[in-house]
Image: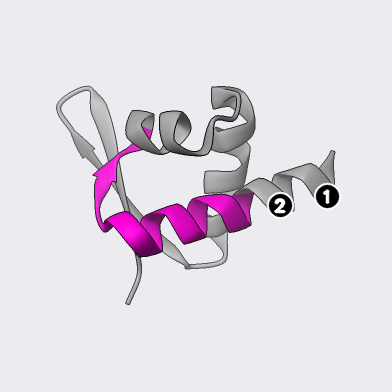
Amino acid sequence: MITEIGIVAGEIWHYLDGHGEVPFDQVVTGIDRPKALALMSLGWLAREGHVIVREEGKALRVALRR
């Protein structure tokens, strides 16, 4: 499972690199992965300091840290 989380983290990174700041649900749709797996991968990226996650109402917006 840890390998798959890492692979999806890379997919999220590439998606954000091409799309900028977007709602997290758009990332999930864009990479076509289960939301639970995408959340684990986003947590990995956040812990490593690669992304910025902010709340906007009830939604999450994510972007790469530049």
Crowd band around label 2 with a 10 angstrom C-alpha radius: few (<14), some (14–19), many (20+): few
Question: Looking at the rendered structure, which numbered label has been put on residue 47?
Answer: none
Cβ–Cβ under 8 Å for marks 1 and 2: yes
- On screen, residue 61 versus residue 14, left or right, reads left
Helix, strand or loop: magenta stretch: helix
Q: Quadrant of residue 33?
A: top right
Report the residue at 57% width, 52% height from top: 11
- Name which residue type carries label 2: Ile
Residue farthest to the bottom?
Answer: 66
Q: Is residue 34 above or below residue 46?
A: above
Report the residue at 57% width, 66% height from top: 48
Question: Looking at the rendered structure, which numbered label has been put on residue 3?
Answer: 1
Nearest to the observer: residue 54 or residue 61: 61
- On screen, residue 28 versus residue 20, left or right, reads right
- Name which residue type carries label 1: Thr
- Residue at mark 2: 7
Q: Quadrant of the C terminus?
A: bottom left
Q: Position of residue 7 (x, y in %)?
A: 71, 52
Report the residue at 54% width, 35% height from top: 39
- On screen, residue 59 versus residue 4, left or right, reads left
Q: Which residues are magenta?
A: 9-24
Q: Position of residue 32 (x, y in %)?
A: 54, 30
Q: Is residue 17 magenta?
A: yes
The kind of secondary structure element at disc 2 is helix
Q: Position of residue 4 (x, y in %)?
A: 78, 43
Q: CA distance from mark 1 to mark 2?
A: 6 Å
The kind of secondary structure element at disc 1 is helix
